[in-house]
Image (spheres, rainbow, N blue to C red):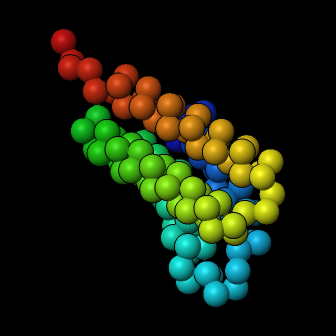
Amino acid sequence: MHTDLEVYKASMLLVKNVYELSKEFPRDEIWGLTSQMKRAATSIPSNIAEGAGRKSKKELLYFLNVSLGSISELQTQLDIADMLGFIKDKQKLEATINISNSVKRQLLSLIKANDKPVS
């Protein structure tokens, strides 16, 4: 079950952090960077869950790779938000970056483990 996967649990924590960080963003960013970050963050556990719910490894790998793309997108958006001075809580930013790096490593490991040819 997807809820038992550590990468799923970590990605859910990442979503929480992104929502907390983006609360401080300027009001005029609500439909811009704020929305993009929330979509990218929620895409990660959503695609892990969808992939885990599929019947084949090929489908699982597809959705894990989509999650991997979303984590890269989110990391870029965090960099942009920081560069623009939107993020005031630097400790929360550092924690969020650390979680995102952990999720990325876990996704890469899960992809590698499931991409081995069946013998």
Nearer the observer, 113 or 33: 33
**Where, by quadrant of the figure, is residue 9 drawn?**
top right
Identify the residue at horizontal 45%, vertical 56% (top origin).
73
Name the one closer to the observer, 21 or 108: 21
Q: Is residue 114 visible?
A: yes
Image quarter where the C terminus lies is: top left
- Where residue 21 appears, x then y in whole percent? 73, 62
Report whether residue 1 is seen.
no
Residue at horizontal 72 percent and vertical 63 percent from the top: 87
Left or right placement of residue 87 versus residue 52 in this view: right
Front residue of 99 and 1: 99
**Residue found at the far bottom of this picture:** 28
Q: Position of residue 114 (x, y in %)?
A: 33, 27
Estimate the x, y position of residue 33 in percent, counting from the top left.
Answer: 55, 73
Name the residue: 65% across, 39% down: 98
* Residue 25: % across, % down: 71, 74
108 vs 27: above or below = above
